[in-house]
Structure formats: C-alpha cells, structure tokens
Image (tube, helix red, strand yellow):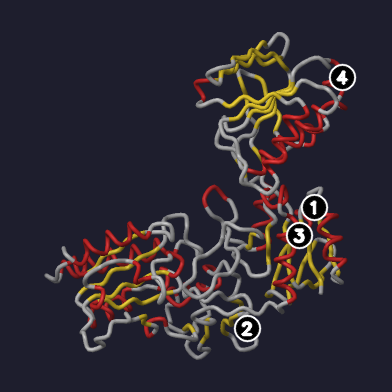
Amino acid sequence: MNVLIIGNNSCNNRVYDYFAQKGMSPVIISDVHNLRSLKGEVGNFTVLTKQNEFYVDFVVITEQYNTLPVVFAGLLATSICSETASNLANTETYKASPKEPIVFLLDYVSPSPTSTTIWALKSAIKLANIKLDIFYIAKFIRTAGNGVEKLYTEARNAGVTFVKYKNNDDIKIDSDLSQEKLLISVSDGAVELELKTTFLFTDGDMDADENFSHLAKALNLIYAKNNFVSDMSNMHDHFGLDSFYLPPTSTSRRGVFHLSRELIAEQLDEGLDKIYTFAKSGFHETFPFGNATIDGDKCAFCYNCYRMCHHAALEADEDDNHMRCLEKACRGCGGCVSICPAKAIALEQNFADAVITDTADNDLVAKEVAIIYCENTGVTSATNFPTISIDDINKIDFIAVPCGGAIDKEFLAGTLNDYKRVMSAVCLDDACRHIDGNKRACAQIIQLSEMLESAGVSKKRLHVVQVSPAMPKVFEDELREFLHT
C-alpha cells in the first residue's frame, strides 16, 4: 500500500517512518509546486508531478498555513511557531544582545490555538533551562490539551515568569526605533512589568499562502472562508453528530488527510493511527443515501456536475460519452442531483422516500408538517428527537437529506402537496460540507415562497432555519413558533 506525504514540514520523516513500519511504501514530496494533479479515488489515486506519474492509495498533507507577521510600532515580531523561537540562543542576533529578556505574547491579535501554546511553552522551557530570562504573557491559560498542564509545570520549574492579562488595555507595546527594541508594559492587576527587548515572539492570524493555495487546487479540495481547506473529517454514522473537530482532519476528498498544526503539536501518533485504521479497513465506507448513479442516455455531457463536485467524484467516461461516478469518492451529498439540467443523476436511495416518522402509538394520525433537514445540522435522529418537547410532535414527519443543496423547488413543491406546511433546517453559513448547499437551499425556498405569494397562497407554508448540532434549543424554538404561527 502506497501513501503520498506532501508538504514542507519537519515531521515528514516521522510520518514516513510510521507508515514504513506498518509495511507501507511512503513517498515524500516536500515541494508542493512539484505536484500537478491528483486523479482517481481513494485506493487508486494517480499522482502527476513535473517529472513522472505514480500511484498511491491515500494522501497525507503536512503543509501548514502561514502565521501572518505582526508589526508593533514599526518593528516586526517573530512568529512563535518559527524555528527561531526555540533556537534563539544560537542566533547571531541574540549573541549580540545576550542579556535581553525574551517575551512570548499570546492571544493579543486573536485567541491563540492550543498548538501555539505548546510551541511557546516548549520554546520557553528550552530557553529557560539555559538560564535566560523568559516571560510568558497570555490572556488565557490552556490546560485541556494533551500534556499541556505538564508543560506549564515544567515552565514554572524552569523559571519562566507568567503574566495573565485580562484584555488588550492591560498591555502596551511601543518601540525605540533608534535601538530597534520593543517597549512592553503589562499588568495582571497585581504585578506590573516594564520590558525592553529585541526578542518578542507572538502569533498573528492564519494565512492560506500561495503554497497552500497551489496544493488545494492540485488536489481539488474545497475552499472555505479565507481560502482555508474545508475540514470534513471523521466520517459520521447515519444521523450521528459529525466529529469534524477531531484529528485526523479529513478533507473534502476521501483518502486525503491534512495533519493540522494542532495535530502535529500534540496528537500526531493518535492521528496517524486513525488514518492507518482507515487504510487497513480497505477504505470501505457507506453513506446513508449511497452513491450518485448516472443515466448515460440522459446525460448531456455538460460538465456541470464535474465542476461543482469538490469531492472529485465525477469524471468523464470518454468511451461512452457521458459522466460517471467514482464510487469510493462519492459522499452521496446529492448536490450533483440538484444541479443536473437533464435530470440524469440520482442517488441510490431516494431521500424523498427516507421518512423518519415518530414513535407514537397512534400511527393513524395524519401528518400535517414536514421537516426537511440536512444531516449535518444534527437536528434529529430516531433516538434523540423525543428529547425535544413539542405537543404536536405526532403531526410531524422528519425527512433527512444528505445536504441542503439536494433540495430543489420540484422536491419542495411535491412535499407541499403532501403536507400543509414545510420547514427546512440547513447548516449555518460557512459550515456547509458540500460547496454551500445550505445557501442554495435557502435560495430555493425563498424563490418558491415568492411564487406561492404571487399565486395567492400564503408563503407561511414554507420556512427555513439555519442551525448547527450545538443549537437544539434554537431549532426547538423555531419549530414551536412555526407550528403555531
């Protein structure tokens, strides 16, 4: 089994050794610009580089986003996550000014991630152990990460001075440009410090630079807000909550994983174990609505589905002159179904027939309301919905769809024929896993509502709400109001 490790990262060799010890054949490409494209599906990817072509079963990205530089009063601070932070004592700049304090500043531009905390603590410990004056200034103390509390203890024992400020008003940073030094005044309410140094390490916002942009394009990955690659990870059970915040971070493309900075900092082996387990399973994975199927007689070869599918599951079948679906790449989101002008695409299981009914004793109660919900909103399941206390629950049918993007006016109109009122629950903006399917769903519902109103039918028959798995009470309130409006 072959694995491609791509990115310029010091952990490459460690990742290589891990998979090699598992009997796999890893290949490292450090220069992301050497990659031209990745075709095919998990278990049978074709990698095209500037020099050659080869095959791999899955891909592990180690390339990281940049941390934007921070300028204080005309002087540039150094990123905490740079190699300079831990090796400062060996630099020529420090050797010229060995008595100056070294300052690590967190949470100033924006709340620092746990990985930055770990980088800062490890660097502070290393420098404090050689008797340098180290100051760790942060708005938050984080102990939830794996082993972070132990690092705080080691840092204190090594002699690091900690200052916890409440807000940015408690810290002032100026500069002495003639000496190229920063002047730092900080107070935690009890202790006030005045520091003058050349060596301030901090972290700015993350930046998807040109390297990462090239990589995402070559791998055909979904871009989210600010050009970051969308996290799709840890495949969920049918109607289960998605644990997308856990490592390893999977991308929009099955079999392509991104080892995020958080993962590399504290849970690399755990993440690699999960990737290895996925690989050893033979990449078998089923989705509630199955794969997209294509009727070659109807397919107009318009490439609309190819352009919109960021799971890279649609490709041209040149022999038969129609599109085809790569089964191991497809996530069954239904986006291609809704966008196909020839209605040539369907899912193996029609979500319109996948109705989750209530468990009331009286099965003869006529249902009046349909709730169409995107699975990833976590609105309901057959087991957890009864926790929502609504008197009219026996009048409601719940219809799960793989993504809001699968909802079109034709499906909505058909649902309105069967129910007096229809509500749709979709993801929050920038949270959709399938190229803004939630926004398309909202647009479809607004258009149909306007059509109903123009025809003299109350547009209150249709409603849409945007919620997340963490907002069950919001959904309950919206549903109760919808039922009684």
Q: Residues within 10 Å of mark 1 (few under 14, many from 20)?
A: few
* Outermost residue, left side: 456
Q: Position of residue 260 (x, y in %)?
A: 67, 52
Mark 1 vs mark 4, foreground winner is 4
Query: Which numbered disc, 1 or 2, marks the residue that appears first in the sequence?
Result: 1
Three-letter amino acid code of the residue under disc 4: Lys
Can you identify the residue that label 4 sits on?
95
Instruction: Work out whether 371 lies above or below 35.
Output: below
- Kindly indicate whether the residue at mark 1 contacts the one at mark 3 (C-beta within 8 angstroms): no
Q: Which mark is residue 317?
A: 2
Dot 1 lies on which element? Answer: loop
Query: Which numbered disc, 4 or 2, marks the residue that appears first in the sequence?
Result: 4
Three-letter amino acid code of the residue under disc 1: Asp
Q: Position of residue 289 (x, y in %)?
A: 49, 81
Three-letter amino acid code of the residue under disc 3: Leu
- Kindly indicate whether the residue at mark 2 contacts the one at mark 3 (C-beta within 8 angstroms): no
- Kindly indicate whether the residue at mark 2 contacts the one at mark 4 (C-beta within 8 angstroms): no
The answer for how far apart the CA atoms under marks 4 and 2 are is 64 Å
Q: Nearer the viewer, residue 475 or 180?
A: 475
Instruction: Work out whether 419 lies above or below 374.
Output: below
Instruction: Work out whether 320 lies above or below 241.
Output: below
Q: Residues within 10 Å of mark 4 (few under 14, many from 20)?
A: few
